[in-house]
Image (cartoon, rainbow, N blue to C red):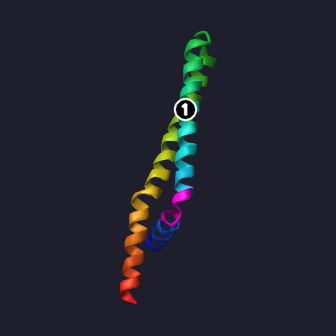
Amino acid sequence: MREKIHRLAMKLGNSPKLALIKMIQGGLLFVFGVLVLMVSDRVLSESLSQEIIALFGLILASCGVIWTMAGYLSMSVLRIYHMLQKRDEDDAN
């Protein structure tokens, strides 16, 4: 299990361009989810369908936050981990 996590961290930390793309996608997904929430609040009349659409918007916004956090962690923390591991491997050789 630890080896799988290590390989995943090395893979994600090796590509800052991909991490930035993930952050942008997550931000856009979050904004779209908030937009759905606002539309359901302001445009739709009070009903069960309004609540279901609002729940859908909340789920979209939550997924956007999680996706953005994954991109941010890949860009910062995992990148630092990748650099430290690479330096340790270079020092060992």
Which quadrant of the structure image shows residue 50?
Answer: top right
As drawn, 56 above or below 3: above
Kindly identify the residue that appears in the image at 43 percent across and 71 percent down: 2
Residue 1 in the image: state x and y as whole percent.
46, 70
Look at the image and say whether residue 14 sits in the magenta stretch.
yes
Kindly identify the residue that appears in the image at 48 percent across and 64 percent down: 13
Kindly identify the residue that appears in the image at 39 percent across and 67 percent down: 81
Residue 62 in the image: state x and y as whole percent.
50, 37
Look at the image and say whether residue 40 sits in the magenta stretch.
no
As drawn, 30 above or below 35: below
Which quadrant of the structure image shows residue 83?
Answer: bottom left
As drawn, 42 above or below 16: above
Q: Residue furthest top?
A: 45
**What segment carries the magenta color?**
12-17
Pick whichever, 48 or 33, lies toward us: 33
Main secondary-structure element of the magenta-colored stretch: helix
Give the residue type that dot 1 points to: Val
Q: Indicate left or right for 25 with 68 as reference.
A: right
Which quadrant of the structure image shows residue 38?
Answer: top right
Q: Indicate left or right for 30 with 92 as reference.
A: right
Pick whichever, 83 or 1, lies toward us: 83
Tally of numbered tags: 1
Residue 5 in the image: state x and y as whole percent.
46, 67
- Secondary structure, mark 1, is helix
Q: Residues within 10 Å of mark 1 (few under 14, many from 20)?
A: some
Kindly identify the residue that appears in the image at 38 percent across and 78 percent down: 87
List the residue tagged with mark 1. 31
